[in-house]
Image (tube, rainbow, N blue to C red):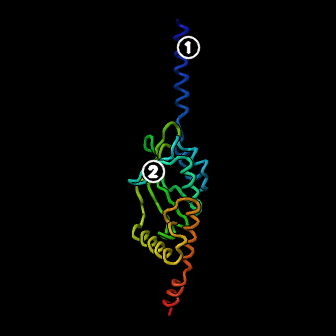
């Protein structure tokens, strides 16, 4: 009986020591996550999540299957994004980050990097969800005006690209880039620019 009690005690101590050593390094996971986003590495990003990929953006709650998330990463990668962690702070079981993102689309619509405050929640040693809780520098009126001007001009001059703004697939992103390029190089902008120099 003494041997059984001693054995059980040793097992309990061993298991509690193992459990303590399994404490996850949230900072390392977050850095790896941002690095994987920066490299548009779908497999690495998807493998960091517990199961489904959850992104909550203010009041919008989005849960992706791995295949659905692959489409979003492919869409995002076309714009050649660059992600940077500006701040990182551990708060209990969560990690609070300030993240900067820049890409062709953001620079076209806003003219400067997009900065957000995000909370990464963990469960069972993996990312459970990423919550965007604040847009730090989002210029809604400029973004909306540039987006509307682009969509209206494309509707009128290149209707074959209609719908690009809602198509979050790789093909949709390629069409989005074409639309931005056509809009930037449109003849009326060249005429406006030359008339303003007179």
Mark 2 lies on residue: 62
**From the viewer's perspective, is residue 77 above or below residue 155?**
above
Measured Cα–Cα span from mark 1 to mark 2? 48 Å
Looking at the rendered structure, the secondary structure element under dot 2 is strand
**From the viewer's perspective, is residue 141 above or below residue 117?**
below
Residue extending farthest bottom: 198
- The answer to which of 41 and 72 lies nearer the viewer is 72
- Residue 76 visible within the image: no
Question: Where's residue 45, x and y in %?
Answer: 57, 48
Question: Where's residue 156, x and y in %?
Answer: 49, 77
Label for residue 154? none
Residue in view at x 56 percent, y 44 percent: 48
Mark 1 closeness class: few <14, some 14–19, many ≥20 residues within 10 Å: few
The part of the image, by quadrant, that contains residue 103 is: bottom right
Mark 1 lies on residue: 7
**From the viewer's perspective, is residue 165 above or below residue 72?**
below
Question: Where's residue 118, x and y in %?
Answer: 45, 52
Residue extending farthest front: 160
- The answer to which of 25 and 39 lies nearer the viewer is 39
Mark before the other along the chain sequence, 1 or 2:
1
Residue in view at x 52 percent, y 20 percent: 12
Q: For the residues carrying marks 1 and 2, which lies nearer the camera in this image?
A: 2
- Residue 162 visible within the image: yes
Looking at the rendered structure, the secondary structure element under dot 1 is helix
Mark 2 closeness class: few <14, some 14–19, many ≥20 residues within 10 Å: few
């Amino acid at each position: 009986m003494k041997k059984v009690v001693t054995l059980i005690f040793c097992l309990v101590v061993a298991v509690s020591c193992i459990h303590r050593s399994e404490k996850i390094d949230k900072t390392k996971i977050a850095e790896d996550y941002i690095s994987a986003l920066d490299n548009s590495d779908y497999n690495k990003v998807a493998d960091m999540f517990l199961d489904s990929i959850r992104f909550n953006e203010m009041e919008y709650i989005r849960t992706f299957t791995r295949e659905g998330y692959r489409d979003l990463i492919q869409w995002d990668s076309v714009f050649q994004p660059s992600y940077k962690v500006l701040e990182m702070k551990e708060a209990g079981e969560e990690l609070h980050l300030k993240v900067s993102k820049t890409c062709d689309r953001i620079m076209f619509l806003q003219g400067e990097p997009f900065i957000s405050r995000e909370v990464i929640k963990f469960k069972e040693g993996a990312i459970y969800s990423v919550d965007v809780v604040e847009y730090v520098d989002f210029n809604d009126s400029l973004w909306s005006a540039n987006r509307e001007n682009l969509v209206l001009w494309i509707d009128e001059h290149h209707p074959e690209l209609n719908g690009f703004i809602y198509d979050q697939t790789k093909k949709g992103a390629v069409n989005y880039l074409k639309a931005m390029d056509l809009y930037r190089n449109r003849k009326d902008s060249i005429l406006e620019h030359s008339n303003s120099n007179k």
